[in-house]
Image (spheres, rainbow, N blue to C red):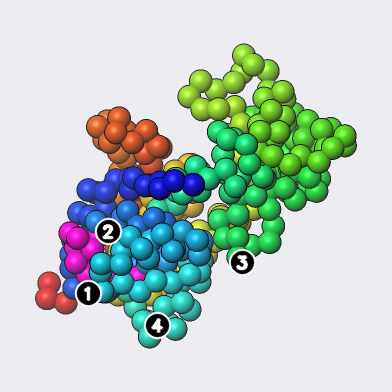
Amino acid sequence: MGEIVHKPVLLDEVISFLLPYQDGVVVDATVGEGGHSTAILDKIRPAKLVALDRDIEILTVARERLSGFSNVIFLYGNYSNLPELLAKEGIETVDAVLMDLGISSFHLEDPERGFSFAEKGPLDMRLDRVGTSLTAFEVVNEWSEKRLREIIREYGEEPWAKRIARRIVEYRKERKIKTTHELADIVKSAVPKRYWPKRIHVATRTFQAIRIAVNDELTHLKEALKRIVDILSPGGRILVISFHSLEDRIVKHSFKKFEEKGLGKVLTKKPIVPTDDEIRENPRSRSAKLRVFERSGSLEGE
């Protein structure tokens, strides 16, 4: 696979919210290929940047990209375990945490990872091939029709979930579903062509649903937000960039709950979205939404 560079979304907006933390500890909890982290290190120059990812393979890419900086700590793990991972490094509180919930180009454009139907690949979809055993192959070939229908409807918000689940089960009676192209073709056959969405591939929602199920993404997101707010220093911030309504709803409701408990305030009453210029330059950014929460208290020197 050739070099793939993921374009960080809402970069200017992220930097503006992180500017107060020039001498602090900033965590990029989804470092990916290091796009946001590079800009944070260049423009914010925090005392320490923690680069975390649940994919040990992509962490290697980030380590290489950020090798010119001496103030970076690289951690492998899930952001839902961030407090424990930081504690091992002697860090109890942090000043800011960034979470970009988008799937990286590193994953999407490698057929062997099985995230995309653009090219034929095995049904894998694991974000962590070391720590996760469940694959998309098992979900598609072993889960019941009822369970498939539920995840495609809930996680994919797919109106044709019932027909898609039934078609998957019918197909696998004849032979195992092994590739991304097979699964995409099954979805195409289940949805009448006149109802195919105009802006996205007809299989997009189903692939999203299966990926979320494989990686238990929504459970980890809820847990991470609940735990990260407790390790923020006074005046510290959580920044979350989400890419679909399920994630955004969790972030919105979590931040609202924190505010109601008196833990701090939501700085983005409405989510910040990309400008038309950014969407033109990076079409993948079009569904991005940034929400920011600030912990009660003030920074030293303010």
Residue 274, compared with residue 302, is above or below; it is above
User: Left of 269 or right of it: where is 258?
Assistant: right
Identify residue for label 1: 47
Q: Residues within 10 Å of mark 1 (few under 14, many from 20)?
A: some
Image position, residue 179 (x, y; %): 69, 39
Image position, residue 263 (x, y; %): 35, 68
Mark 2 residue type: Thr
Alpha-carbon span between mark 3 and mark 4 = 21 Å
User: Quick one: label 2 or label 4, which is nearer the N terminus?
Assistant: 2
User: Quick one: label 3 or label 4, which is nearer the N terminus?
Assistant: 4
Image position, residue 10 (x, y; %): 29, 45
Magenta region, residue range: 40-50
Identify the disc placed on residue 38. 2
Alpha-carbon span between mark 1 and mark 2 = 14 Å
Mark 1 residue type: Ala
Identify residue for label 4: 89
Residue 164, compared with residue 104, is above or below; it is above
Query: Could you tell me if the residues under marks 1 and 2 are in contact, i.e. CB atoms within 8 Å?
Result: no
Query: Could you tell me if the residues under marks 3 and 2 are in contact, i.e. CB atoms within 8 Å?
Result: no
Residue beneath the point at 16% across and 77% down: 300
Point out the residue furthest to the front here: 2
Displayed quadrant of residue 205: top right
Identify residue for label 3: 131
Q: Residues within 10 Å of mark 2 (few under 14, many from 20)?
A: some
Residue beneath the point at 36% across and 63% down: 64
Residue 65 in view: yes
Q: Residues within 10 Å of mark 4 (few under 14, many from 20)?
A: few
